[in-house]
Amino acid sequence: MRVLGIDPGLTRCGVGVVDVDPDRRARLVHVGVIRTPAQLPLERRLLAIAEGIALALDEHAPHAVAVERMFAQHNVRTVMGTAQASGIAMHAAAARGLPVSLHTPSEVKAAVTGYGSADKRQVGAMVARILGLDAVPTPADAADALALALCSAWRSGSPTAPAIADGALTPAQRAWRAAERSGPARRVGA
């Protein structure tokens, strides 16, 4: 299963593609960050993000897309930019007929580290370990995009999750599956 993870942002939009085997082993396919300068008009920044996401979709042909779910913040400007980038990511996936799953930061942290309050350093370190990388992808937006892709691929019941018996899961993955079974669906259109 190939999943494109997108950590949306107006200044930096992380994109990460992973291949995940039925036994949950994962390999890095691509990681990067789409950057837009603050002095560009908003519509040009959004166009640049759309073009960068389209390029990743066309070059890597994922089976599904995972996007960070918006959460409340005090900075309205940051929320607006993130929401706009999220909308562009979901539109690009939907236009290609790809399923989209949304994940909160705490869901992603729990899936990758086993702890929903992990910090960015811990998430980055686990992403590097899971993917067998020599270093944590930088900036953090890149590592977050890979964590989103991994989270989506490992989710049971999601369109991106391979069928895995509970016995083949790590303790963190078993806890994630149990929590997921008791919680609401997080997929667009669900």
Image: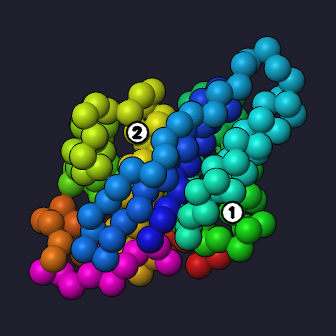
Disc 1 element:
helix
Name the residue located 69 percent from the left edge and 63 percent from the top edge. 93
- Look at label 2 and name its amino acid: Ala
State which quadrant residue 172 falls in: bottom left
Q: Distance between the residues labelled 2 and 1?
A: 20 Å
State which quadrant residue 96 falls in: bottom right
* Residue 118 visible at all: no
Residue 2, image x, y percentages: 48, 65
Give the vertical position of 45 relative to 60 (above or below): above
Foreground: 153 or 73? 153
Which numbered tag is attached to residue 122? none
Disc 2 element:
helix
Give the vertical position of 122 relative to 68 (above or below): above
Name the residue located 86 percent from the left edge and 24 percent from the top edge. 41
Horizontal arrangement in the rendering, residue 118 relative to residue 6 (left or right): left
- Look at label 1 and name its amino acid: Ala
**Where the N terminus falls, by quadrant?**
bottom left
Residue 156, image x, y percentages: 36, 77
Residue wearing tag 1: 93
Residue 16, image x, y percentages: 49, 47
The segment highlighted magenta reads 159-167
Residue 51, image x, y percentages: 77, 43
Horizontal arrangement in the rendering, residue 22 relative to residue 32 (left or right): left
Q: Which residue lies furthest to the top in this view?
A: 39
Q: Which of marks 2 and 1 is nearer the N terminus?
A: 1
Magenta: main secondary structure equals loop
Give the vertical position of 186 relative to 159 (above or below): above
Mark 2, other Cα within 10 Å: few <14 / some 14–19 / many ≥20: many
Residue wearing tag 2: 143
**Where the C terminus falls, by quadrant?**
bottom right
Q: Does the magenta stretch include residue 165?
A: yes
